[in-house]
Amino acid sequence: MPEQRIEAHIGEVLTGEAQKNARALVAHLRANEMRFERGKGYWADKLYWMITYQGEYVCFILLNGSEDKTEPAGWVIWHDDGGTNCFADFPLDQRARETAWKHVDVCANCGGCKQPGGTRKTIFWKQFDNVCVTPLKFVNPDAEGLACVRKMIGIRKAAIQMTI
């Protein structure tokens, strides 16, 4: 099977501003030495990529231009915190914190969380209940959301660097 580069699928699935934003984010991830791996298991037949840095998960990206209504249409970015508290008290400005808070990923009991219903988690000094194992989820992010996505990627990368 030929390499399944996300860039090719972005052009097939997304249009307009969504396509431009997705391409910019992928270029940002590649410039920051992130690795892309196609999804496995449930995600194997979807346009889903696991993004890692130094072998640790950073985020996950889904492109959904199909009739599959089990996932949101367009594109989705889930952030991974590696089970750490890297998003707990990192110093962010109020606007960025509020943007992140609007995108807290509430557990939907999909089976990915270690305990059904998610966990209690502090995200930028604010407590949330029922948080998914992927604590932040951005669906079709606008410019402000995309700026926040980039900040979360930077925070996660820095946390990984501190452990290696």
Image (tube, rainbow, N blue to C red):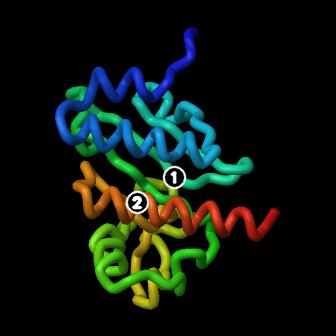
Identify the residue at horizontal 51%, vertical 52% (top origin). 59
Dot placed on the residue nearer the N-terminal end, 1 or 2? 1
Above or below, 64 against 159 in this view is: above
Contact flag, marks 1 and 2 (Cβ < 8 Å) = yes
Percent across and percent down for residue 29 are 52, 45
Percent across and percent down for residue 160 are 70, 63
Identify the residue at horizontal 53%, vertical 82% (top origin). 90
> Gap between marks 1 and 2, in whole Å?
9 Å
The local crowd at label 1, few if under 14, some if 14 to 19, many if 20 or more residues have their Cα within 10 Å, is: many
| Residue located farthest toward the top when viewing the structure as drawn | 1
Q: Is residue 36 left or right of residue 8?
A: right
Residue position for label 1:
59
Q: Is residue 36 left or right of residue 139?
A: right
Can residue 10 be spotted in the picture? yes
Q: Is residue 15 left or right of residue 90?
A: left
Can residue 108 be spotted in the picture? no
Nearest the viewer among 4 and 149 is 149
Percent across and percent down for residue 40 are 56, 33
Q: Is residue 29 left or right of residue 98?
A: right
The local crowd at label 2, few if under 14, some if 14 to 19, many if 20 or more residues have their Cα within 10 Å, is: many
User: What is the quadrant of residue 126 in the picture?
Assistant: bottom left
Residue position for label 2:
149
Badge nearest the viewer, 1 or 2: 2
Above or below, 122 against 28 in this view is: below
Nearest the viewer among 56 and 23 is 23
